Amino acid sequence: MSAATRQVVVGKERAKPVLIGGGAPIPVQGMTKTDTADARATIDQIMAMADAGCEIVRVSVPTPRAAEAMPKILAASPIPVVADIHFDWRLALAALRAGVDKLRINPGNIGSREKIAEVVTEAKVRGVPIRVGVNSGSLERDILQKYGHPTAEALVESAVRHLGYLEELGHEEAVVSVKASDVPTMVAAYRLLSKRVDYPLHLGVTESGTVATGTVKSAVGIGILLAEGIGDTIRVSLAGDVLEEIRVGREILKSLDLRVFGPTVVACPTCARCDIDVMKVAAEVEHRLKDVTIPLRISVLGCAVNGPGEARESDVGIAGGPGFGIMFKHGEKVGRVNEADMIETLVDEVRRMEAERSDG
């Protein structure tokens, strides 16, 4: 969330446009996994993603049939929609004419300079931002020949080249990404790019892997850069449930105190000292409070080593004993509860706190 980057508005015609860059809160993006030509399935997934906290959704437009479905999808989406285009500039033109909120193109495979110019000119006329999306797997041939393989320098050279094309055509409302599937290259590329341009940066580790490995890679790569003040919007790419991508993205921002998305549950990893079923209590509490929007720190700790201290640092918490827990609220001990009643007690207390803040 760098205040040094320029700001881009996505979804200008919508009731709630999203700002990227210029110190705006970092939005979490996602991408549908449905066949875009199936408008109903795509709309249903967008709705679920929006409910999970997705703020900008990207939709692949790989065929004319997908392009034909875009007006219906755009009319139904509650959040800004980005059309993702590869190989065929005519699909980019079709998406723009359908009223898409933003366009993502990979200039290395979209076509000739003339074709790129036609797309950029149409986007400029319509006031639609463009994301220049450079990936390690689809660099231009001459750049690959120059560097030998997709290095950080190669990714940045491609990005700067194509941002230059946009500037030559007078369209500077752009976002840029330089994604790689390995974290060191991705981090190095964004560090280099952040020194070269002031466009908002879209962060992500492309093709990061399954939910388990991809979550780790994304958290490390995106987290390093955000901690350094680099990055204006993020997308977690996982070979798994699209809602898991949104959850991970939000947790990355929460962990760095960059966004507030409801409660944070602090739980110990358990060991032989543990006197209560921490995993069960913490997981159930987190699940049952997923709709809570107020920022709270909730602790579920299993023994007397760190439990009381951690619980006192939370808004509400439990430090476990053999079959029971000591309840803390705002640092003060407020009572003792049986293990069987812990989940209900914690949930009820958080609901009361939520109601008190709402009334206040």
Image: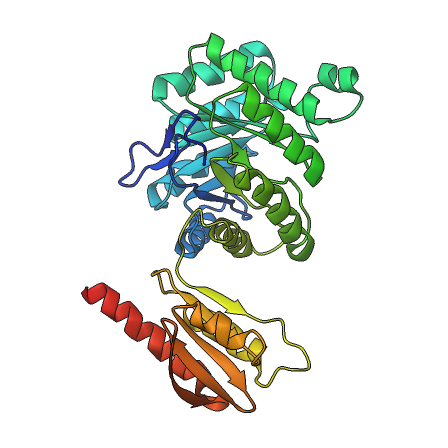
Q: Which of 343 and 204 is in front in this view?
A: 343
- Asked if residue 119 is positioned above or below residue 202 in the image, the reply reads above
Q: Can residue 311 be seen in this view?
A: yes
Q: Can residue 139 be seen in this view?
A: no
Residue 329, image x and y in percent?
A: 37, 75
- Asked if residue 144 is positioned above or below residue 13 in the image, the reply reads above
Q: Which of 44 and 259 is in front in this view?
A: 259
Colour mapping: rainbow
Residue 318, image x and y in percent?
A: 46, 79
Q: Quadrant of the C terminus?
A: bottom left
Residue 356, image x and y in percent?
A: 24, 69
Q: In which quarter of the image is the N terminus?
A: top left
Which residue is pictured at 44% across the width and 26% down the height? 5
Which residue is pictured at 39% across the width and 34% down the height? 23
Which residue is pictured at 69% across the width and 30% down the height? 136
Residue 54, image x and y in percent?
A: 44, 49
